[in-house]
Amino acid sequence: MQTTEMVQRDAPQISQEEEFDKNFKPRGAIAFFILLVLLGAFIWYGIYFIMLGRV
């Protein structure tokens, strides 16, 4: 009898987790990655143009 109750309680949680997984988009991680690439490019080209100015 207890196992039946446990299965019924767990069923809604699984469907909510599956729904969350379907709609999940890691926007923060993608934004962080883009900012990291932009910062790297800014530093890289900053040094590049400094070196070109020395020639």
Image: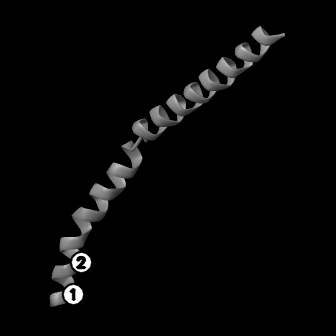
In the rendered image, which quarter contains the C terminus?
top right
Question: Is 34 situated above or below 20?
Answer: above
Q: Position of residue 36 (x, y in %)?
A: 54, 33
Q: Residues within 10 Å of mark 2 (few under 14, many from 20)?
A: few
Q: Position of residue 48 (x, y in %)?
A: 73, 19
Q: Residue furthest right?
A: 55
- Residue 14: image quadrant is bottom left
Left or right: residue 30 versus residue 23 is right
Left or right: residue 46 versus residue 9 is right
Q: Tell me if label 2 and label 1 are in contact, CB under 8 Å.
A: yes
Residue type, numbered disc 2: Val
- Kindly identify the residue that appears in the image at 60 percent across and 21 percent down: 42
Q: Position of residue 39 (x, y in %)?
A: 55, 27
- Residue 13: image quadrant is bottom left
Residue type, numbered disc 1: Thr
- Kindly identify the residue that appears in the image at 41 percent across and 36 percent down: 27
Q: Which residue is mark 1?
A: 3
Q: How many marks?
A: 2
The colouring scheme, among rainbow, by chain, secondary structure or one colour, is one colour
Residue 7 marker: 2
- Residue 29: image quadrant is top left
Q: SS for tag 1? A: helix
Q: Position of residue 11 (x, y in %)?
A: 25, 68
Spatial separation of the CA atoms under disc 2 and disc 1? 6 Å
Q: Residues within 10 Å of mark 1 (few under 14, many from 20)?
A: few
- Kindly identify the residue that appears in the image at 24 percent across and 71 percent down: 10
Q: Residue furthest front?
A: 54
Q: SS for tag 2? A: helix
In the rendered image, which quarter contains the N terminus?
bottom left
- Kindly identify the residue that appears in the image at 36 percent across and 56 percent down: 18
